[in-house]
Image (tube, helix red, strand yellow):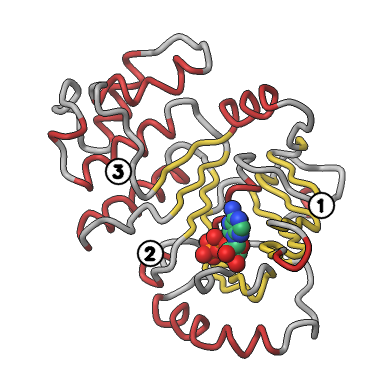
Amino acid sequence: MSERERRPGNRSAEALRLVSVSKVYGAGDGAVTALDGVTLSLPAGSFTAIMGPSGSGKSTLLQCAAGLDRTDRGQVLVGGTEMPGGGEAALTRFRRERIGFVFQQYNLLPTLTVEENTALPLRLAGRKADPERVRALLAQVGLGDRLHHRPDALSGGQRQRVAIARALVTRPGLLFADEPTGALDTRSARDVLGLLREAVCLHGSTVVLVTHDPVAASHADSVLFLADGRLAGHLPAPTAEAVAERMTHLGDRVAARGTGSGPLTGV
Ligand code: ADP
């Protein structure tokens, strides 16, 4: 990182920043602390995987970082701009302009064609659908000959590729993928992970991948580990073996927590 990028005033190279983010579900005796003071920074153009045991707070982190849910404490900044407080409308607009999503279950609308599904985020944002861009994206994900098919005529891997094209159509700076390969066979999963990498390389997006699969995580530039709602480690240039090894030892890290899990940077 250059001196200029390191200066606190320069946010342009930072895609996502979380500052002491906490989230508690419920109240009183039944309260569950899902996120407990998470601070992290992801540079623009990075590809980061978030891993952790079930219940460690991965989904909550994604929901809060993507503005799908509100934090209880702390700040979320996307591209240097703080997530808007107040009404739902401002938050929805913020999300639509800056953030793309890919979910495990694709979330395509069954009555719309592949082309219409892909253009939908533009329509929802009140922007003009650009048929050429939609078709170019679908060609890039290998579905240039499926424009008029409906989702039920596609395989799981093909549906997820439509979902990636749809996520990229608004040119989001930040793309969140929540277990995008969870329902796919090995080959389709590899294709989808390759497309997420292309989102970084070709479209300049910053990708955050939530997964429980060490092989999927190894496609990222680095892995952030969560345990018990706290950051519990950072692994740059991950291999599947190294990720699996870290996951095995996460229990030990949780036991030792409080011994210095400070702010982490996913570089
Ligand atoms: P992960 O995605 O790593 O499995 P989650 O973020 O889903 O973890 O959950 C973190 C913790 O918060 C868990 O203990 C879970 O039971 C709890 N939790 C998540 N969502 C809710 C909710 N809507 N209401 C109550 N507890 C929740």
- For badge 3, the amino acid type reads Gln
- Quadrant housing residue 153: top left
Q: Do the residues labelled 3 and 2 touch (CB within 8 Å)?
A: no
In the picture of the structure, the residue carrying the numbered disc 3 is 160
In the picture of the structure, the residue carrying the numbered disc 1 is 73
- In the depicted structure, whether residue 203 falls above or below residue 93: below
Cα distance in 3D space between marks 3 and 2: 15 Å
Cα distance in 3D space between marks 3 and 1: 34 Å
- For badge 1, the amino acid type reads Arg
Q: In this view, does 113 lie to the left or right of 19?
A: left
Q: Where's residue 168, x and y in %?
A: 43, 33
* Residue at screen point 21% across, 32% down: 151
In the picture of the structure, the residue carrying the numbered disc 2 is 216
Q: Which mark is residue 16?
A: none
- In the depicted structure, whether residue 136 falls above or below residue 100: above
Residues packed near mark 2 inside 10 Å, few (<14), some (14 to 19) or many (20 plus):
many
- Callout 2: CB less than 8 Å from ligand 1: no
- In front of the other: label 3 or label 2? 3
* Residue at screen point 44% across, 62% down: 211
User: Which one is earlier in the sequence, the residue at label 2 or at label 1?
Assistant: 1
Can see residue 267? Answer: no
